[in-house]
Image (tube, helix red, strand yellow):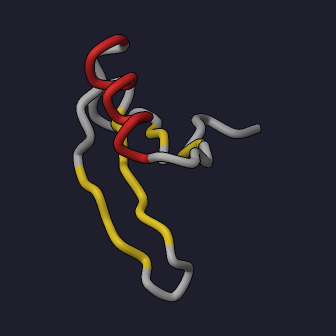
Amino acid sequence: MPKRIDHVAIIVKNIEQALSFYRDVLGITPSAIKEVPTEQVRIAFLPLGGPGGARLN
């Protein structure tokens, strides 16, 4: 039986617009934003639930 969720990925068209929603409305600050050139994407890591919690990315 799983003990926790490691991460949930949400795909958006505009990462800046999505991040403003997560920051300004939900109060979730990204812990990192990474470029993945091979996939032509940017990934934002949004930690939830404190240490050992899940994250959205």
Residue drawn at point x = 42 percent, y = 59 percent: 43
Q: How many marks?
A: 0
| Residue drawn at point x = 40 percent, y = 33 percent | 53
Dividing the picture into quadrants, the one containing residue 42 is: bottom left
Q: Is residue 50 left or right of residue 57?
A: left
Q: In the shown orientation, is residue 39 left or right of residue 37?
A: right
- Position of the N terminus by quadrant: top right
Q: Tell which residue pokes out farthest to the top in this image.
A: 25
Where does residue 31 sit, x and y in percent of width and height?
Answer: 23, 45
User: In this rendering, is residue 9 above or below 46?
Assistant: below
Name the residue rendered at 37%, 25% in the picture.
22
The relative height of residue 5 versus residue 13 in the rendered view (above or below) is above
Q: Residue furthest bottom?
A: 38
Q: Residue furthest right?
A: 1
Q: Is residue 32 left or right of residue 19?
A: left
Res 2 quadrant in image: top right
Horizontal placement of 41 versus 9: left or right?
left
Residue nearest the observer in this picture, 19 or 50: 19
Give x and y (percent) for residue 24: 27, 16
Whole-percent x and y of residue 25?
A: 34, 11
